[in-house]
Image (cartoon, helix red, strand yellow):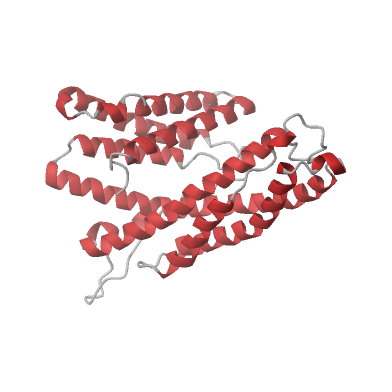
Amino acid sequence: MKTLPRVVVAAALLLAASAAGRAQTIGELPDDKFKLVVDKTLLYTKALNAARTVQKAYDKYASWVDVKTGPTGKEKAIASGLADIAIAVQDIAEAAKNGPGMWPPLPNVDAMAQKLADATNALAPVAKSASDYYSQGQYKKDAAKQGQALHAELVPKFEQFFGSEMALRRELSAVREDVERRYLAQIEKEKGKNYEWHLRSVLIAARTVADLLPNHADAAMIEGARFKARFSALQAAYMAFGQYCVEHPAEVQKTILSTSLDDFLAATRILRGVLDAPKPDRQVYVTKVSDLAAKYDILLERTSATGTASR
């Protein structure tokens, strides 16, 4: 799956204005309108989080089956089968059903949410059949013959799903960044560049790195130059945050930062080293991408628990 250029919505996003008819950016919206943007963004973010369940199900499936040839029935880990994705299907469908009707209209984002839902709906019944097939041990009775047929259907549908997920993630990314930048500006205006301001700056930089991570194990490698640029921005934000913490120790929330930020930065640095190699080792790369994604999930969990992540 080829890497798509980032769609720069942040600079061009113009939202319908009120009576005056003047276009407004997210940063200029009144608070009530801004809340509507946040609500819509959160709905689509929930769909993307649900998509991670599908991605993990595929990665587990691909860990034991030869994706190119399909199952033989003799694989050691064949009993792992394919995990159920029903909960993810529901969340993605809800976003596609409700999101486009919410203010503001975001044509590209709305269209990609619907496209993801369509791809999920196409995948879901085949994935359910495969999940049942393996969990019930039917492959033992037919030498994986039905498994081969299911595999032939699953692979193109997973590919369609991954392409749709990536498109929605990248369309939504710039909108989310505008939302986060507005929060930063609000914090700076009210309290200056305090602890929360610096922490949010790091989280914004961390998300831009995470947005480059592929959404399945067989995806094309991340472009090294893009990753390096975002890593540099993350490192700069982290260093500024660290300096602030040294100078204002009373504000530091150690329960959040004890390991999650350090671990994420370390994993990011390791992946950068892998990508910097003249010929990156594919297996090492996949392992380090998976590790970085896991570290990012932990970071989000710890910051969300305190309300520091996107409101």
Number of marks in the image?
A: 0
Determine the image quadrant of residue 82: top right
On the image, the x and y values in percent for residue 285 come to 58, 28
> In the picture provided, is 262 more to the left or to the right than 199?
right
Instruction: Say which residue appears at 71% left-offset and 33% top-offset.
Output: 64
Q: Is residue 181 visible?
A: yes
Instruction: Say which residue appears at 19% left-offset and 49% top-offset.
Output: 186
**Residue extending farthest front:** 136
Q: Is residue 7 visible?
A: no
Instruction: Say which residue appears at 44% left-offset and 28% top-offset.
Output: 268
> In the picture provided, is 19 more to the left or to the right than 107?
left
Camera-nearest residue between 146 and 24: 146
Instruction: Say which residue appears at 34% left-offset and 55% top-offset.
Output: 11
Q: Quadrant of the N terminus?
A: top right
On the image, the x and y values in percent for residue 253 come to 24, 30
On the image, the x and y values in percent for residue 254 come to 26, 26
**Residue extending farthest bottom:** 19
Position of 159 relative to 236 (above/below): below
On the image, the x and y values in percent for residue 182 come to 25, 51
Position of 123 relative to 134 (above/below): below
> In the picture provided, is 283 more to the left or to the right than 211?
right
